[in-house]
Image (cartoon, rainbow, N blue to C red):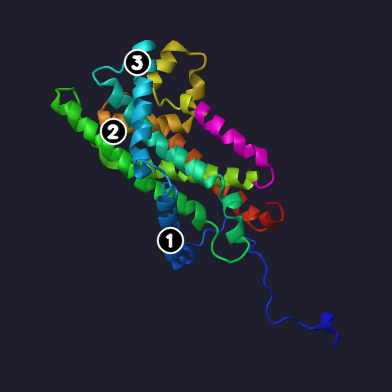
Amino acid sequence: MNIENKDWLFEITPKNNFLSLNFKEIWQYRDLLFLFVKRDVITVYKQTVLGPLWYLIQPLFTSVTFTIIFNNVAGINTGTIPPFLFNLAGITVWNYFTACLTGTSDTFKANASIFGKVYFPRIITPLSVVISNLIKFGIQFFIFVFFYVFYYIQGADLALNGLVVFFPVLIAVMGVLGLGLGMLISSMVTKYRDFSHLITFGISLLMYLSAVMYPMALIKEKLPKFGWIVAYNPLAYIIETSRYMLLNVGETSILGLCYTLLVTIAIFFVGLLVFNKTEKSFIDTV
C-alpha cells in the first residue's frame, strides 16, 4: 500500500495563534491548577525546620534591616509613620512580585519532565505560582495588619486612605506584571541557561529602583538627574500607591498608574506571545 498518497483522518498540529489564552480550557483543567497550587504551597517548606514561619521571618528581618540602615543610619524620614511600618508595607507588596517573578521564570526548566509526557495548558504552571503566592502574601499582609494595629494603639498617627478599597486591584496588577515578566524570562532560559543566574541579581537591583524603602519624592529631591529612572519604573508607582492606600502617606499619580497599567498589559501579552511560541519547541532545547 502506498502510504504517502493516503489521506490522514486526523492531523495533530500546534496552534497557530501565539496569543491564545483559552480560558475555557484552563477552567476545564482547574483541578490540575488547584493541585499545582497545593504542591507549590506544601512542598516548598516541607523539609524545612521552621516551615511556613519563613513567610513571617523574611519580611520582618528585612524590615528591621531597612529601618536600621536607611532610616537610622542614612536618615530617610518617613514623617509621622513609624519607619518599620513604612518599610514593612513596601516589602510586603514587593515580596509578592518577586515571588511571582522567580517562581514563573523557571517554568519550562522545572517542569520539563511533565511537559514532555502529558498534555495540559502550559499556562497553568505559571498561573499556579501566581495564585499560590497569594496565600503567602495573605500571611505576610496579616503581619502588616498586626503591626499596624500595634502602632495605632501606641498612639501613632495612622489612617487608611479611602482608596484602600482598590488595594486588591493593585495586587492583581502586580501579579499580572510578575506573570508576564516570568513567562518572558522562562522562555529565554530554555536557550540561555546562564540567564537564570542573573535573575537574583536583577531583582535585588530592581528593588532599589522601585521605591521600596524610600518615598518617590525623596529620590526626585535628592537625585533629580537620576529620578527619571524611578519615574519610568511601573513597580515604583505600585509600591508608592500601596503605601498611600495603607498608610495615607506619600502621593499617588493617576497618570503614573495609567502608565503602569499599560506597561503591565504590554508585558503580559509579549510574555504570553513568547511563552506560547516557546512551548511548541522548548523540549528540544531543555
Q: Residue at x 32, y 29 (%)?
A: 88
Residue 2 in sight from this viewpoint: yes
What residue is at 50 percent from the left and 28 percent from the top? 204
Quadrant of the rendered image containing residue 33: bottom left
The amino acid at mark 2 is: Met
Q: Quadrant of the N terminus?
A: bottom right
Image disc number at residue 71: 3
Queried whether the magenta region covers residue 254, the answer comes back as no
Q: Earlier in the sequence, mark 1 or mark 3?
A: 1
Q: Secondary structure at mark 3?
A: helix
Mark found first going from the N terminus, 3 or 2: 3
Q: Nearer the viewer, residue 230 or 124?
A: 124
- Magenta segment, which residues? 190-205
Where 63 sits versus 139, above or below?
Answer: above
Place of residue 236 in the rendered image (x, y in percent of width and height, measured from the top left):
43, 29
Badge 1 local density, few (<14 within 10 Å), some, or many (20+)? Answer: few
Q: Is residue 192 magenta?
A: yes
Which numbered disc, 2 or 1, marks the residue closer to the eye?
1
C-alpha distance separating marks 3 and 2: 21 Å
* Residue at image coords 54%, 62%: 121
Q: Earlier in the sequence, mark 2 or mark 1?
A: 1
The Cα–Cα distance between marks 2 and 1, rounded to whole angstroms, is: 34 Å
* Left or right: 191, with 175 as reference point: right
